[in-house]
Amino acid sequence: MPRNTLTEQQRIFARELAISGVTQTEAAIRAGYSVSDAGPRGSKLANNPHVKAAIERLRSRMERKAEARAAFTRDNALDLLAELAQDEENAPRDRIAALRAIADLEAWNTPTRSEHVTVHADIRQLLEGSGLTRDDLRALAFPSKQRRIAAPPPPVIDADDADIT
Protein backbone atom coordinates (compact mmCIF):
# COMPACT_ATOMS: atom_id res chain seq x y z
CA MET A 1 0.00 0.00 0.00
CA PRO A 2 1.44 3.44 -0.93
CA ARG A 3 2.40 5.67 2.00
CA ASN A 4 -0.07 8.48 1.18
CA THR A 5 -3.11 6.22 0.84
CA LEU A 6 -5.46 6.23 3.81
CA THR A 7 -7.13 3.14 5.15
CA GLU A 8 -10.91 3.06 5.33
CA GLN A 9 -10.75 3.69 9.09
CA GLN A 10 -8.42 6.66 8.59
CA ARG A 11 -10.76 8.12 5.94
CA ILE A 12 -13.74 7.76 8.27
CA PHE A 13 -11.76 9.32 11.13
CA ALA A 14 -10.78 12.31 8.96
CA ARG A 15 -14.34 12.78 7.71
CA GLU A 16 -15.83 12.59 11.21
CA LEU A 17 -13.27 14.97 12.67
CA ALA A 18 -13.55 17.49 9.82
CA ILE A 19 -17.26 17.39 9.05
CA SER A 20 -19.01 16.22 12.20
CA GLY A 21 -16.90 18.34 14.52
CA VAL A 22 -16.56 15.63 17.13
CA THR A 23 -13.58 15.05 19.38
CA GLN A 24 -10.62 12.95 18.25
CA THR A 25 -11.73 10.17 20.62
CA GLU A 26 -15.30 10.15 19.26
CA ALA A 27 -14.02 10.25 15.66
CA ALA A 28 -11.79 7.23 16.39
CA ILE A 29 -14.74 5.33 17.89
CA ARG A 30 -16.94 6.17 14.88
CA ALA A 31 -14.14 5.01 12.60
CA GLY A 32 -14.28 1.58 14.25
CA TYR A 33 -11.38 1.73 16.69
CA SER A 34 -11.92 0.17 20.12
CA VAL A 35 -13.40 2.36 22.83
CA SER A 36 -10.58 1.50 25.25
CA ASP A 37 -7.92 2.60 22.75
CA ALA A 38 -9.85 5.48 21.11
CA GLY A 39 -8.21 8.36 23.03
CA PRO A 40 -4.57 7.61 22.19
CA ARG A 41 -5.52 6.31 18.73
CA GLY A 42 -7.42 9.52 17.93
CA SER A 43 -4.44 11.63 18.99
CA LYS A 44 -2.05 9.51 16.92
CA LEU A 45 -4.32 9.67 13.87
CA ALA A 46 -4.79 13.45 14.18
CA ASN A 47 -0.99 13.88 14.09
CA ASN A 48 -0.50 11.54 11.11
CA PRO A 49 0.56 13.85 8.22
CA HIS A 50 -1.60 12.03 5.65
CA VAL A 51 -4.67 12.09 7.89
CA LYS A 52 -3.96 15.75 8.73
CA ALA A 53 -3.82 16.60 5.03
CA ALA A 54 -7.11 14.77 4.42
CA ILE A 55 -8.75 16.67 7.30
CA GLU A 56 -7.53 20.00 5.89
CA ARG A 57 -8.78 19.12 2.39
CA LEU A 58 -12.21 18.23 3.77
CA ARG A 59 -12.43 21.41 5.86
CA SER A 60 -11.32 23.53 2.92
CA ARG A 61 -13.91 21.90 0.66
CA MET A 62 -16.62 22.52 3.27
CA GLU A 63 -15.66 26.19 3.57
CA ARG A 64 -15.73 26.67 -0.21
CA LYS A 65 -19.16 25.06 -0.43
CA ALA A 66 -20.50 27.20 2.41
CA GLU A 67 -19.18 30.36 0.75
CA ALA A 68 -20.68 29.32 -2.58
CA ARG A 69 -24.07 28.68 -0.97
CA ALA A 70 -23.99 32.03 0.82
CA ALA A 71 -23.08 33.92 -2.36
CA PHE A 72 -25.70 32.04 -4.35
CA THR A 73 -28.41 32.79 -1.82
CA ARG A 74 -27.55 36.50 -1.54
CA ASP A 75 -27.24 37.03 -5.28
CA ASN A 76 -30.51 35.24 -5.96
CA ALA A 77 -32.27 37.23 -3.27
CA LEU A 78 -31.04 40.48 -4.80
CA ASP A 79 -32.15 39.39 -8.27
CA LEU A 80 -35.63 38.42 -7.06
CA LEU A 81 -36.02 41.63 -5.10
CA ALA A 82 -34.94 43.70 -8.11
CA GLU A 83 -37.55 41.94 -10.24
CA LEU A 84 -40.22 42.64 -7.64
CA ALA A 85 -39.23 46.29 -7.39
CA GLN A 86 -39.32 46.78 -11.17
CA ASP A 87 -42.48 44.81 -11.96
CA GLU A 88 -45.23 47.38 -12.52
CA GLU A 89 -47.92 44.77 -11.90
CA ASN A 90 -46.88 44.56 -8.24
CA ALA A 91 -48.54 46.82 -5.72
CA PRO A 92 -46.53 49.96 -4.94
CA ARG A 93 -46.25 48.85 -1.30
CA ASP A 94 -44.59 45.59 -2.42
CA ARG A 95 -42.24 47.42 -4.76
CA ILE A 96 -41.17 49.79 -1.99
CA ALA A 97 -40.69 46.86 0.40
CA ALA A 98 -38.46 45.19 -2.19
CA LEU A 99 -36.37 48.37 -2.52
CA ARG A 100 -35.99 48.49 1.26
CA ALA A 101 -34.95 44.84 1.39
CA ILE A 102 -32.34 45.46 -1.31
CA ALA A 103 -31.03 48.39 0.72
CA ASP A 104 -30.80 46.18 3.80
CA LEU A 105 -28.98 43.39 1.94
CA GLU A 106 -26.58 45.86 0.37
CA ALA A 107 -26.05 47.49 3.77
CA TRP A 108 -26.76 50.92 2.36
CA ASN A 109 -26.25 53.58 4.97
CA THR A 110 -27.07 57.25 4.67
CA PRO A 111 -27.02 57.89 0.94
CA THR A 112 -24.57 60.26 -0.65
CA ARG A 113 -25.96 63.09 -2.74
CA SER A 114 -25.62 61.11 -5.98
CA GLU A 115 -27.26 58.04 -4.41
CA HIS A 116 -30.09 60.20 -3.10
CA VAL A 117 -30.70 61.64 -6.56
CA THR A 118 -30.68 58.15 -8.09
CA VAL A 119 -33.13 56.77 -5.52
CA HIS A 120 -35.28 59.88 -5.93
CA ALA A 121 -35.37 59.28 -9.70
CA ASP A 122 -36.30 55.62 -9.11
CA ILE A 123 -39.15 56.66 -6.83
CA ARG A 124 -40.31 59.24 -9.38
CA GLN A 125 -40.42 56.46 -12.00
CA LEU A 126 -42.47 54.31 -9.62
CA LEU A 127 -44.95 57.15 -9.20
CA GLU A 128 -45.36 57.89 -12.90
CA GLY A 129 -48.44 56.20 -14.24
CA SER A 130 -49.31 54.61 -10.91
CA GLY A 131 -51.88 57.22 -9.95
CA LEU A 132 -50.12 57.69 -6.62
CA THR A 133 -49.18 61.04 -5.19
CA ARG A 134 -46.17 61.86 -3.03
CA ASP A 135 -48.48 61.76 0.00
CA ASP A 136 -49.68 58.28 -0.99
CA LEU A 137 -46.07 57.13 -1.26
CA ARG A 138 -45.21 58.74 2.08
CA ALA A 139 -48.20 56.98 3.69
CA LEU A 140 -47.02 53.64 2.27
CA ALA A 141 -43.42 54.17 3.31
CA PHE A 142 -44.15 55.57 6.78
CA PRO A 143 -47.50 54.17 7.94
CA SER A 144 -46.87 55.11 11.59
CA LYS A 145 -46.48 58.79 10.63
CA GLN A 146 -49.66 58.80 8.61
CA ARG A 147 -52.16 61.42 9.74
CA ARG A 148 -55.51 60.06 10.69
CA ILE A 149 -58.17 61.72 8.59
CA ALA A 150 -61.75 61.43 9.72
CA ALA A 151 -64.12 59.89 7.22
CA PRO A 152 -66.43 62.42 5.60
CA PRO A 153 -69.93 62.46 7.04
CA PRO A 154 -72.55 60.47 5.13
CA PRO A 155 -74.66 62.52 2.72
CA VAL A 156 -77.85 63.92 4.13
CA ILE A 157 -80.90 62.71 2.29
CA ASP A 158 -83.87 64.99 2.36
CA ALA A 159 -87.20 63.29 2.89
CA ASP A 160 -88.43 65.00 -0.27
CA ASP A 161 -85.51 63.57 -2.28
CA ALA A 162 -86.02 60.02 -1.09
CA ASP A 163 -88.04 57.90 -3.44
CA ILE A 164 -90.29 56.00 -1.07
CA THR A 165 -92.82 53.83 -2.75
Image: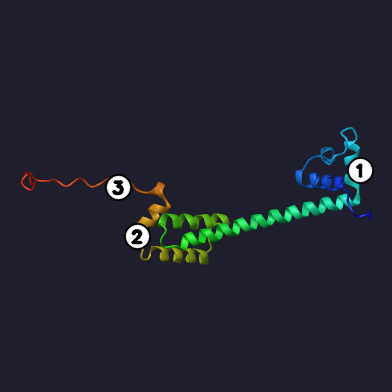
Q: Distance between the residues labelled 3 and 2?
A: 16 Å
> Given this view, does label 1 or label 2 mark the residue nearer the observer?
1
**Residue identified by numbered label 1:** 44
> For the residue carrying disc 3, how many other residues have a C-alpha within 10 Å: few (<14), some (14-19), or many (20+)?
few
**Residue identified by numbered label 2:** 133
Percent position (x, y) of residue 132?
A: 35, 60
Percent position (x, y) of residue 35?
A: 87, 33
**Residue identified by numbered label 3:** 149
Q: What residue type is labelled 2?
A: Thr
101 or 133, nearer to the observer: 101
Quadrant in the picture for residue 137:
bottom left
> For the residue carrying disc 1, how many other residues have a C-alpha within 10 Å: few (<14), some (14-19), or many (20+)?
few
Q: Which of marks 3 and 2 is nearer the N terminus?
A: 2
| Most distant residue in the top direction | 36
The answer to whether one can see residue 90 in this image is yes
Residue at x 57% of width, y 55% of height:
105
